[in-house]
Amino acid sequence: MSLKRALSAFGWRRPGMANTALLGLPGAWFAGLYLAAIGALLVTSFWTVDDLSGDLIPGFSFVNFQQIFSGPVYIRIALRTIGIAAAVTITDVILAWPVAYAMIRLAGPRLRAAMMAAVMVPLWSSYLARVYAWRVILSHNGLLNWALMEIGLPRAHIGYSNWAMWIVFSYLWLPFMILPVASSVERIPPSLLEASADLGARGLSTFRRVVLPLALPGMVAGAIFTFSLTLGDYVTPMLVGGRGSDFIGNVVYSNVGVTNNIPFAAAYAVLPLGVMAVFLLIARKLGAFDAL
Amino acid sequence: MRSETLIWAAVAAIFAFLFIPIVVIILYAFSAAPIPAWPIMGFALHWFADTWNDEAVRQALLLSLEVASVATLAAMLLGTLAAMAVARMQSAAKEVVSFIVVLPIALPGILTGMALAAYFAFWGVNLSYWTIVAGHVTFCVVIVYNNVVARLRRMPRSLTEASADLGADAFRTFRLIQLPMMASAIGAGALLAFALSFDEVIVTTFTAGAQNTLPLWIFGAIRLGQQLPEVNVVVFAIILFTAVPVLLAQKLIGQSGRVAR
């Protein structure tokens, strides 16, 4: 008992020590596993592989990075990944606004709670289930083509293409955009909207000049998820993308799983790390971390 | 008034977009056809029994449940400790720690997976049950952390100070004041962490050896185009069983909070 009291008193007098004690276990976990793993990724990206035995050869060589930047193949894959991630993010911003705005500004409390639950269920229902659903819907004999034929239109060939990836990714990550946008709209004091109306602004101009800028951190917070989740995926490209729709993740995956070239895979995975570092720095400047 | 109607029309269309795929995949679980096509021609229930009797599915399910349980328990401990520390910290250090803690979900999944694969290769660790768990704990911690830190932000510091004034030491204050106030947030975080672990596939492929978790089994079956009726059933069951913890978690957090991923 007295030991407990002594410890408590010590922690009270020195909050820094108490914080360190609390952080010890999670800190060790993070430093020892996650941060060390990122470090190992960076280190092994300079290693090479013995062609015959397949053993890792430690060292410091730029061979892997040279291979990435020497031909058009890997650059094209990187640009496709980043391009689709950007397109998905923009699409989700556009789709999130009506839902977020209606939920916070137009709906009553009960409807709002119901809408919130309706956004939450797809967010947490199985990722694979939802990708698979789209694979089936967009396939040749799927729901989409059936619906098109019913209304007298020709079949669409969306399945297994970049269009399919764009639709499916936008679908998968939409709830991640709706939630932060909604919570940043919720934080805008109604008095600002009234003031804007008093000063003669109509609905749309109030939205463009007051609501939109104030909700920017929420949009950027959502964009971190939509962009990062798309950037780091390889399952969706494999299941709904067509031939030649490889993502960075697919190259990484096949180099680990099929050819067992971990150093090259690590080097290629450094690319999304760099992209996200830039993205997070900009997001921080725009105040997105307060809206997370 | 007209613009409001337009907004509601857009909202209805977007919710249809969100839910049609889920409804479609639920319907396919009852389809009799061995290959999914639309419209569904006949309905059957025997795929449920076939799936239940499939040894590979059972083993994958068992492994997923084990991994999710252990990862969730570890995440509850680590996430709560980290949240309590961050809630007590001052501005500069607080920003650094709270930034690092969310990295596993802010950075792309392929990066986390590849980093862990490189790390285990670096030490020559063989992939096993424990490497899967280690991978899952990294992102499950963030889920618990997010929920607990949001609760602590709304919990006034004066309560712990009052407890100290009344003569309770830090451990007693934790047991009688802080833990009861955090309990529902920890519970909600744990439910969501479990749901996430149970469903994770991107990181898991890099940390699993020969074992199959349930998502890995589904992924393999879809890719090879085999056992699709069983995939339909498994996916239907997963949607059903993850909806329960998620809605429960939302209830625990209450109206004022939101589920943080």
Image (tube, coloured by chain):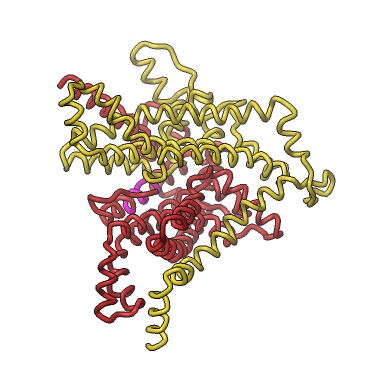
Q: Residue A254 appears at what percent x and percent y?
A: 66, 40
**Quadrant placement of the C terminus of chain A:** top left
Q: Residue B70 appears at what percent x and percent y?
A: 48, 64
Magenta stretch: give its range.
B238-245
Q: Is residue B178 magenta?
A: no
**Quadrant placement of the N terminus of chain A:** bottom left
Residue under the point 49% across and 18% down: A157
Q: Residue A8 appears at what percent x and percent y?
A: 39, 79
Q: Is residue B226 visible in this depiction of the protein?
A: no
Q: Is residue A79 visible in this depiction of the protein?
A: yes
Q: Main secondary structure of the magenta part?
A: helix
Residue under the point 61% across and 26% down: A243
Residue under the point 70% across and 60% down: B123
Residue under the point 21% across and 22% down: A201
Colour of the chain lettered B: red
Quick one: A102 or A55, which is closer to the camera? Answer: A102
Chain coloured yellow in this rendering: A
Compared to B164, does B32 lie above or below?
above
Q: Residue B208 appears at what percent x and percent y?
A: 60, 53
Left or right: A169 in relation to A198: right
